[in-house]
Image (cartoon, rainbow, N blue to C red):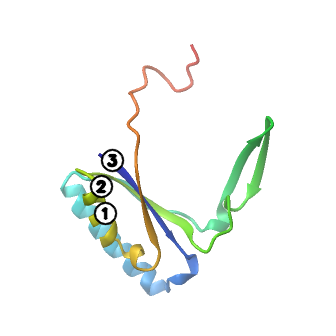
Amino acid sequence: MKYMLLIYGAEDSWTEDEREGCMRESMAICKELAAEGKWIASSPLHPVDTATSVRVREGRRQITDGPFAETTEQLGGYYIIDVEDLDEAIAIAGRLPPAHKGTVEIRPIYPLPEPSGSCYDHE
């Protein structure tokens, strides 16, 4: 089963040394998961002040600088893993350094059928 682990936390809660340690530890976990065939992708995100939000209301596109909502914790990164079940995803999420300062949200990923052509084909 594929899961996305969404990393939330206050952007200002990490010192530079803590951030470097977090990255080293996270990369070691990714390497371990990759060796087990369980890691698909992961990446930190740029700070929330670089976000652009797009909404369409009544047929009109609205573009806003910044995140969708003001919150104390921001989406800071993600992991995509392929594991046996939710229990295994929970165990991995609990090992991630950001879980100690923020929140790791676990969401199952819907499997999609392989596209028969380009996603731009409208026929």
Q: Residue lying furthest front in this view?
A: 87
Which quarter shows the N terminus?
Answer: top left
Task: Find residue 112 and report its image quarter.
Answer: top left
Check disc 1 and give the amino acid type: Ile
Residue 31: give x, y in percent of width and height.
Answer: 25, 62
Check disc 2 and give the amino acid type: Leu
- Relative placement, left or right, of 77 versus 85 is right
Between residues 30 and 100, which one lies in front from this camera angle? Answer: 100
How far is mark 3 from mark 1, CA to CA?
13 Å
Q: Secondary structure at mark 2?
A: helix
- Vertical side of 30 occupied by 39: above or below: above
Residue 105: give x, y in percent of width and height.
Answer: 44, 62
Q: Which residue is mark 2?
A: 86
How far is mark 1 from mark 2, CA to CA?
6 Å
Which tag, 3 or 1, sits closer to the chain's start? 3
How far is mark 3 from mark 2, CA to CA?
9 Å
Q: Secondary structure at mark 3?
A: strand
Which tag, 3 or 2, sits closer to the chain's start? 3
Please tell me whether mark 3 or mark 1 is closer to you in this view: 1
Q: Secondary structure at mark 1?
A: helix
Q: Which residue is mark 1?
A: 90
Between residues 65 and 90, which one lies in front from this camera angle? Answer: 90
Report the residue at 53% width, 83% height from top.
13
Residue 85: give x, y in percent of width and height.
Answer: 26, 52
- Relative placement, left or right, of 26 versus 37 is right
Which quarter shows the C terminus?
Answer: top right
Give residue 117's mark: none
Pointer 1 with pointer 2, Cβ within 8 A? yes
Other residues around mark 3 within 10 Å, as few (<14) / some (14–19) / many (≥20): many
- Vertical side of 63 occupied by 25: above or below: below
Please tell me whether mark 3 or mark 2 is closer to you in this view: 2
